[in-house]
Image (tube, grey):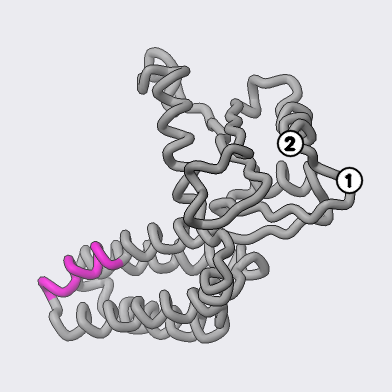
Amino acid sequence: MRTRRKAGFFEVIAGRSIVAFKREHAEASPSAKRFAFVQTYDTKPRRRVWELMKSQGLQENQEVLFLSDGGETVRNLQAYLHPSSKHDLDWFHITMGLTVLNQQTKGVAEEDSALGAETAQSLESVKHDLWHGTVEAAWERIEGVLFELDLRKSRSTATATLSRSVTEFDTDMRNNRAFIPNFGERYRQGDMISTTFVESTINQVVSKRFVKK
């Protein structure tokens, strides 16, 4: 978030802790508690989140699942709170990244319809691979996309922009490869795969504390 008088930015970490989760009850769960803090300002942010989880009945040896956008700051917080916990990249983060790439692919298609169609089809296959947790297949497809884009990016601004974005997406996914589960299997079991419900938490916190300023 931008600081007062636009003098730089600061990071707000926000989330929701749920004791018992099923997808259809994500918003209505009475056991859910929200939290948010500015890590560079709060004197004991990790202790505060830990106490929140303890107030919900967290036991020392209890299994905990953390879902996040894969950012290092958040990942370090999770590891501190519960070193033996399970960490997954959330599906919402993946789909948002692919949505941006698909939008940029439309710009490429206006200049080169064949390349645009081929790239769009490959990105859809990447989404399918990541959904099923077959990350190696996803890497191969992304490498193929980058190869084709690199051949043409010097002649097209739209292609060069898409190439940079695909490279960033690829780096992000590879950095979090150990945290990409089989989302399809988890979804069929009724388990949580996405942090979309946290978006409402962030909006509530920002509206209440900062009046969206």
- Asked if residue 105 is among those painted magenta in the image, a careful observer would answer yes
Asked if residue 206 lies left or right of residue 58, the reply is: left
Query: How would you classify the magenta stretch by its main secondary structure?
Result: helix
Give the vertical position of 158 relative to 8 (above or below): below
- Asked if residue 64 is among those painted magenta in the image, a careful observer would answer no
The residue under the point 63% across, 41% down is: 17
Residue 149 x %, y %: 31, 77
The residue under the point 55% across, 82% down is: 134
Residue 22 x %, y %: 56, 56
Q: Is residue 27 visible?
A: yes
The residue under the point 47% across, 57% down is: 93
Residue 60 tag number: 1
- Three-letter residue code for mark 1: Glu
Asked if residue 124 lies left or right of residue 39, the reply is: left
Spatial CA span between label 2 and label 1: 12 Å
Residue range corresponding to the magenta coloring: 102-111
Residue extending furthest right? Answer: 60
Give the vertical position of 168 relative to 66 (above or below): below
- Three-letter residue code for mark 2: Gln
Q: Which residue is mark 2?
A: 56
Residue 104 x %, y %: 25, 63
